[in-house]
Amino acid sequence: MGINTLIICIVLVVLCSSPTNGQLSSTFYNNTCPKALSIVRAAVKQALAKEKRMGASLVRLHFHDCFVNGRDGSILLDDSANITGEKSAGPNNNSVRGFDVIDTIKTQLEAACTGIVSCADILAIAARDSVVELGGPTWRVQLGRRDSRNASLRGANSQIPAPTSNLSALISSFSNKGLSTKDMIALSGAHTIGQARCTTFKGHIYNETNINSTFATSVKANCPSTGGDNNLSPLDVQTATVFDNKYYINLKSQKGLLHSYQELFNGGSADSQVTTYSNKRNTFFRDFAAAMVNMGNISPLTGTNGEVRKNCRKPN
């Protein structure tokens, strides 16, 4: 074998093996489904035009999927005879939404390039596009994930941080996923959009003192001490459908809706970073984008691991 032929063979081996060696790439679908990103972007834009809150819901799907066995699309699986899904877990039941938007995107992608784009990648792209559509930063989404064939109800119940978590527990939860405290505080800024159910913050507004009294009174009007558990309140009382840094400004005024939010500004080690983000939106945007890439890279299935589901709700 001549030297030139040998070099060509080596190059081909490297190129052909790269999708199976665990490496993700922002250009993964450039050749196999060149319209993938534009299809997702258009569908997200259409969904948010109907309901801006859907942007927060799509970001939340990304979070809750990543925290259970990594970014693998497991949160999308419905219960079946062989699978106990994650949708009925405590953090997800009657809470996570946006599955119909993901279904629509998947149908459009299957029509454009059958069996190419994974549901796990759809979640990652849709989260990014939702943030951008609501005024937030953009970033290069790393792609090439495969979908899991199973889900983990136990993992969803134990690994997703609870709204009652203290700062130490939050730091540990993110550290267990390979994310730094800086990542955790930046990612928490996603709560500058969306709404929460009364049941998740009732204890904070009625039983705790590290909360602005006027703010607490205003929230109590829609969250009675008894009943009303599914009533909704905006996470950011200033700009609930705009991705900005008002979440951190609220924390400095003790207007964090959930206990876990206010833990980030409560005389502890996170205070300085919250102060920085409250004063410097662009710094928050930069760190949030970097942290979203880090979170999307938690234990992805690649190459021959997993599959590309034809229907995001069930294995092939």
Image (tube, grey):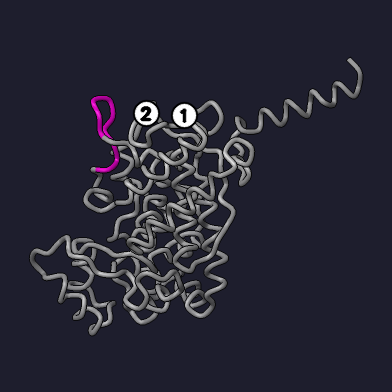
Residue at (28, 29) in percent of width and height? 83
Task: Look at the magenta stretch and give its main secondary structure.
Answer: loop
User: For the magenta stretch, what is the residue range?
Assistant: 79-87
181 to the left or right of 215: right
x then y, percent, for residue 85: 28, 36
160 to the left or right of 186: left
Q: Quadrant of residue 225?
A: bottom left
Residue at (34, 50) in percent of width and height? 160
The verdict on residue 30 being magenta is: no
Q: Disc 2 vs disc 1: Cβ atoms closer than 8 Å?
A: yes
**Residue 307: which disc?**
1
Which residue is at the front of the view, 122 or 276?
122
Visible residue check, residue 240: yes
Say which amino acid is labelled 2: Pro
Say which amino acid is labelled 1: Glu
**Residue 83: which disc?**
none
x then y, percent, for residue 239: 37, 75
Visible residue check, residue 262: no
- Of all residues shown, which one is farthest toward the bottom? 214
x then y, percent, for residue 92: 27, 49
The tag earlier along the polypeptide, 2 or 1, is 1
- Of all residues shown, which one is farthest toward the left? 226
- Of all residues shown, which one is farthest toward the top? 1
**Residue 315: which disc?**
2
Q: Quadrant of residue 152?
A: top left
Residue at (19, 61) in percent of width and height? 199
User: Tag 1, which secondary structure?
Assistant: loop
Q: In 3D space, how far apart are the residues under numbered discs 2 and 1 (Cα atoms)? A: 8 Å
x then y, percent, for residue 79: 25, 34
Which residue is at the front of the view, 19 or 312?
312
